[in-house]
Structures are given as structure tokens and as C-alpha cells.
Amino acid sequence: MQPTFVAFTPWTTLKGYCELLQAIDALDLIDHVAPVQLVIRLLIPRGSRLLELDDVGALVGEFSPSTLTYPWRHPIPEVDALQRRLESIVGHRLMSDRQDVFARVWDEAHAAAGEPAKRVEQPRRARAAIPYLNEPWYC
């Protein structure tokens, strides 16, 4: 199983993001989740039905021809700041051990949310026990 999701949306909260990480941990999915999945930000392309929502319309900027999306700002600036920090952490560790990257993301997210960062690490599996693509562009 290789779960994929969009972690950062206009509706993501700091606490909600920590709850996502806690669910990944509780379900023993850390080794199954590519670290890039922890930082993916919602893309809003031209023609998106999301643009019809008043709350989304208030967050988006002008259409960007270079990215083919409407850039958006989160209503809580700390969520955008966390996403940028995590993107840097993950981006500099594309080939690193998933458990190590997850631990860094966990600590950063819980600190941003003011939540206790206590986590009991599970014994690590051998890398071969969880098959996955390890190319850095994979998502």
C-alpha cells in the first residue's frame, strides 16, 4: 500500500495536520508513505470547481501561466509557514530514511501547533520489507 493525499489545503489546520501524522503513525504506515506526500499542497488549476467556493475565491491570487494554477494563501499564515518549512526538510532529504524524515516532520509540526511532540518509535523494518519506488520525483 502506498497512500497518497493532499496534506495542505485551505481547510488544513495545524492541529489537523498533527492528527494526520498521528494517524499515519498509529496505522503503522510511515514506511509506506513517501515523504513528499507529507508536504503536497493543493493545486487549483484553471476551471477548478473550487474557484466557485466563496472561501476559496477569497484566498486565490491571479492565475499563474508558469505553474498553470491559481496560487493561494492559507487563511492561517502559520499553516503556510509550516508547509514551506516541511517542504524544505523533505526536499533536502529525498533519499533519506522515511522514519527519519517523518520524525523531523513530526517534531516541526507539533512545535508549530504547540502540541506535545511525544512519540514512541516502533522497531524499524528492513528496507526490503516495504517495496516502494525510491526516485525523488515520484509522487
Image: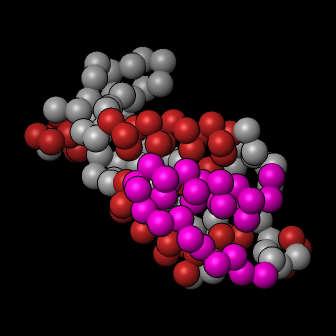
**Residue positioned 23% across, 44% down in the render:** 50
With 95 as the anchor, is 14 left or right in this view? Answer: left
In the displayed structure, 45 sits above or below 9; it is above
Magenta-highlighted residues: 96-123
State the quadrant of the N terminus: bottom right
In the displayed structure, 106 sits above or below 27; it is above
Image x and y of residue 75, in percent: 24, 39
**Residue positioned 38% across, 43% down in the render:** 79
Residue 34 in view in this figure: no
Q: Verify whether residue 115 appears in magenta.
A: yes
**Residue positioned 28% across, 19% down in the render:** 62
Q: Quadrant of residue 16?
A: bottom left
Q: Residue furthest left?
A: 54
How is the model colour-coded? secondary structure
Using the image as rendered, state which of residue 101 and residue 10 is in the foreground. Answer: 101
Residue 55 in view in this figure: yes
Q: Quadrant of residue 28?
A: bottom right
In the displayed structure, 11 sits above or below 117; it is above
Q: Quadrant of residue 129?
A: bottom right
With 116 as the anchor, is 125 left or right in this view? Answer: right
Q: What is the number of callouts on the image?
A: 0
With 88 as the anchor, is 117 left or right in this view? Answer: left
With 63 as the anchor, is 127 left or right in this view? Answer: right
Using the image as rendered, state which of residue 120 and residue 87 is in the foreground. Answer: 120
Image x and y of residue 15, in percent: 36, 61
Image x and y of residue 82, in percent: 47, 42
Q: Verify whether residue 9 appears in magenta.
A: no
Image x and y of residue 37, in percent: 57, 55
